Amino acid sequence: MALSHDDLWPRAGSWPDHASGQEADAALLGVPTWRTSLSPTGAHATPAAVREALTRYSATLMGPPAVDLNEALRVVDGGDVTEPDGDAGISATVARVREIAEDARLVIALGGDNALTYPVARGARATGLITIDAHFDLRDGVSNGSPVRRLIEDAPDGERIDPTRVVQIGIADFANSAAYAARAAEWGIRVITLDEVRRRGTPEVVAEAIGVAGSGAAARVHLDVDVDAADRAAAPGCPASVPGGFAAGELRALVRAIVADPRVVSADIAEVDATADADDLRTVRLAALCVLEMLAALAGR
């Protein structure tokens, strides 16, 4: 269905292409990983779907005063990494993120399954990692279930992330194993379960997470937003989402609060399968709103 046009109601999305050497506040990059997913997925279709969904929203914060993010920020689009899976794809993604990061304060990668977190965090030269995820992603091997372990163990020298600078927010009951919980504890990862977030509240949890992941001189934090941390009613297009996860508003508030800190230099949005979404595209639309929350946070820094 064609969208209506109103000069007084500008839409989000459709931002200009990234041009090397031209400074920007934020840059999108599609990283449509999907080939190593542990469950069948059409996540490679998601970057395009999120871009389309962005045009259904305005880029205006209500304030007061109202702020048009299209005027407050320069946002550009770096296109897609053509084939991000496999060794060559990982190298290409790392290189592309580094190229874009030279020009932008915040790189926002649109997945794709969670395998994208490994090359995107490396490309951004992250020294700390915050995940919003129902799962640990500490599995052995190479898959969408292993990016956190890979950043700790498999990345080249000088690019590995110290596990004591990893914070995992939203880890859920009945979505993990005791063995991976023990691995996280052994490595010194700070795990903040879904129940703990709800008990303590977003501001306190985010302050701790940023303090841990953003510790040290010249800290650079990557945020991984695995949308399957959301309740399945809000995210039916995530293969591993479960009933009882974060409400859409809770997820959005976490994203905005974390990205508000200037130590966050990159983020990804992962695990949305646009081909498996509900008819109203609620999962893809939530992913698009997470992009807008990141931009709102950036404008407020």
Image: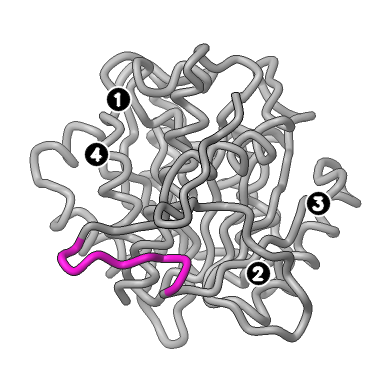
Q: Which quarter of the figure has residue 44?
A: top right
> How far apart are the two marked residues, 3 and 1, measured between alpha carbons?
31 Å
Query: Is residue 106 part of the magenta span, yes or no?
Result: no
Whether residue 66 is in magenta: the answer is: yes
Report the magenta residues as a range: 63-71
Query: Which residue does the image show at 56% across and 32% down from the upper left?
Result: 271
- Name the residue type under label 4: Glu
Q: Secondary structure at mark 1?
A: loop
What colour scheme does the image use?
Answer: one colour
Write the residue at 51% across / 37% down.
4
Per the rendering, the mark at residue 159 is 2
User: The disc labelled 1 sits on which kind of residue?
Assistant: Gly
Residue 250, labelled with which disc?
Answer: 4
Classed neighbour count for the residue bearing mark 4: other residues with Cα under 10 Å, few (<14), some (14–19), many (≥20):
some
Inter-mark Cα distance, 3 to 4: 30 Å
In which quarter of the view is residue 233 placed? top left
| Residue contact at pointers 1 and 4, CB within 8 angstroms | no
Location of residue 17 with respect to 194 vertically, above or below: below
Report the amino acid beneath label 3.
Answer: Val
Q: Is residue 150 visible?
A: yes
Image depth: mark 4 or mark 2 in front: 4
Q: Residue at x 47, y 33 (%)?
A: 285
The numbered mark, 1 or 4, whose residue comes first in the sequence reads 1
Residue, far left = 199
Res 177 visible: no
Which circle marks residue 245 in the picture? 1
Residue 183 image position (x, y, % from top left): 45, 40
> Which residue occupies the foreground of this view, 107 or 286?
286
Q: Mark 3 sits on what residue?
A: 81
Residue extending furthest toward the right: 88
